[in-house]
Image (cartoon, rainbow, N blue to C red):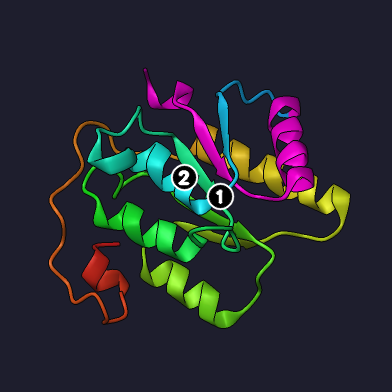
């Protein structure tokens, strides 16, 4: 299945945010299936396979909340980036946390974007619409197999020079 038709994975435990996100993506005419996962363990199992089983089709983008039950979003992101199969899948952190430490940790672990969810209903919907349109229409993901892992210290901050950006 081409990347533009690959599913969008939404990992969020807030039913209101999930409903608004899915509705907004549909209104923006984004036809990709939206797979909703309500906790971090469910996300890990779905994306990496339960008990080491092969992962399903890779999503075109993962919209990841940080404050999740069972396994938090930071740990989900760490596991996704540690696995060769999901290392290059775009991950957009969409969270209510505006803590600098969450932002820094997310980028250090390989998040592609960090968005603080607006509290206002219409601003939230507009943010989701823009995120969906960018990642589904404008972004050009890599095709084929993921590149070999880069050699870098896991505790050192990443700079553009180290990550090849």
Q: Is residue 78 above or below residue 127?
A: below
On residue 43, the disc is 2
Contact (Cβ within 8 Å) of mark 2 with mark 1:
yes
Residue 21 lies in magenta, yes or no?
A: yes
The residues bearing labels 2 and 1 have C-alpha atoms spaced at a distance of: 6 Å
Q: Decide which of 38, 139 is in the foreground and name it.
A: 38
Residue 9 lies in magenta, yes or no?
A: yes
Q: Position of residue 102 (x, y in %)?
A: 53, 74
**Which residue appears farthest toward the top when viewing the image?**
1
- Quarter of the image that includes the N terminus: top left
Q: Is 122 situated left or right of 95 in this image?
A: right
Q: Position of residue 128 (x, y in %)?
A: 69, 45
Q: Secondary structure at mark 2?
A: helix
Q: Position of residue 83 (x, y in %)?
A: 24, 50
On residue 39, the disc is 1
- Quarter of the image that includes the C terminus: bottom left
Q: Which residues are magenta?
A: 1-27
Q: Position of residue 15 (x, y in %)?
A: 75, 44
Q: Is residue 28 above or below residue 161?
A: above
Residue 107 quadrant: bottom left
| Mark 2, other Cα within 10 Å: few <14 / some 14–19 / many ≥20 | many
Q: Secondary structure at mark 1?
A: loop
């Amino acid at each position: 299945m081409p990347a533009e038709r690959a599913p969008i994975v939404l990992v969020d435990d807030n039913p209101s945010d999930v409903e608004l996100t899915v509705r907004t993506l549909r209104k923006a005419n984004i036809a990709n299936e939206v797979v909703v996962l309500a906790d971090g363990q469910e996300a890990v199992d779905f994306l990496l396979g339960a008990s080491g089983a092969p992962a399903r089709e890779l999503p075109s983008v993962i919209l990841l909340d940080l404050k999740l039950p069972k396994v938090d979003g930071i740990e989900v992101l760490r596991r996704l980036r540690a696995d060769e199969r999901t290392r290059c899948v775009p991950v957009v952190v969409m969270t209510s946390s505006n803590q600098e430490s969450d932002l820094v940790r997310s980028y250090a672990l390989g998040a592609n974007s960090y968005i603080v969810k607006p509290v206002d209903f219409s601003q939230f919907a507009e943010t989701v619409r823009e995120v969906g349109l960018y990642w589904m229409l404008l972004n050009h993901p890599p095709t084929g197999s993921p590149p070999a892992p880069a050699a870098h210290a896991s505790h050192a901050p990443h700079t553009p020079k180290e990550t090849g950006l």
